[in-house]
Image: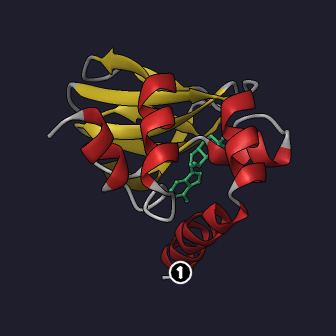
Amino acid sequence: MDLEQMLASVPLFAVLDARTVRRLAQQAVRRSYAAGATIVEQGETGTALYVIASGRVRVEHRDGAERHGLNELGRGDFFGELALIENRPRSASVVALEETECLLFVVWEFRALLKEHPEMAIPIMNALIERLHRAEH
Ligand code: CMP
């Protein structure tokens, strides 16, 4: 599967037309992380949105030395959107559980995309609802 097909299969981008997905494939920055590497650090300023191309990550909340696992995400999932939407520090840390490859979209690209395609709010909202349900149970 090439990058364009991979992106088109990601629920976040499924609402976009083929031309936009092609543009996204050109903008994406591929980055690999070894198992145990911290991809996003809680409290830091957000500079990009991450889509998982392969591998698995754990989202965790850090309170001093204590770490509390919030969720695990895999291929096709995205993270790092909150800091970009809210303009606030990262709400959690994200750690690679295994060798993981992510596609990064820098903040201004993501914001421009959201402005041009407000229908992207729907998969983002769905992800937030799923997290809310998880938190409740
Ligand atoms: P952001 O706050 O930018 O950086 C940390 C990311 O972890 C956050 O965006 C979300 O994408 C993700 N995240 C935070 N809380 C949860 C959760 N409960 N379940 C899944 N992902 C989460």
x and y percentages locating residue 6 in the rendered image: 27, 44
x and y percentages locating residue 27 in the rendered image: 51, 24
The answer to whether residue 16 is above or below residue 31 is: below
The answer to which of 129 and 48 lies nearer the viewer is 48
Q: Which residue is at 31% across, 17% downward?
A: 32
Q: Quadrant of residue 2?
A: top left
The answer to whether residue 46 is above or below residue 51 is: above
The answer to whether residue 67 is above or below residue 73 is: above
Q: Secondary structure at mark 1?
A: helix
Q: Is residue 80 toward the left or the right of residue 16 in the image?
A: right
x and y percentages locating residue 92 in the rendered image: 61, 41
The answer to which of 77 and 90 lies nearer the viewer is 77
Q: Which residue is at 49% across, 27% downward?
A: 104
Label 1, on which residue? Answer: 133
Q: Which residue is at 72% across, 24% downward?
A: 44
The colour style of the image is: secondary structure
Q: Quadrant of residue 107?
A: top right
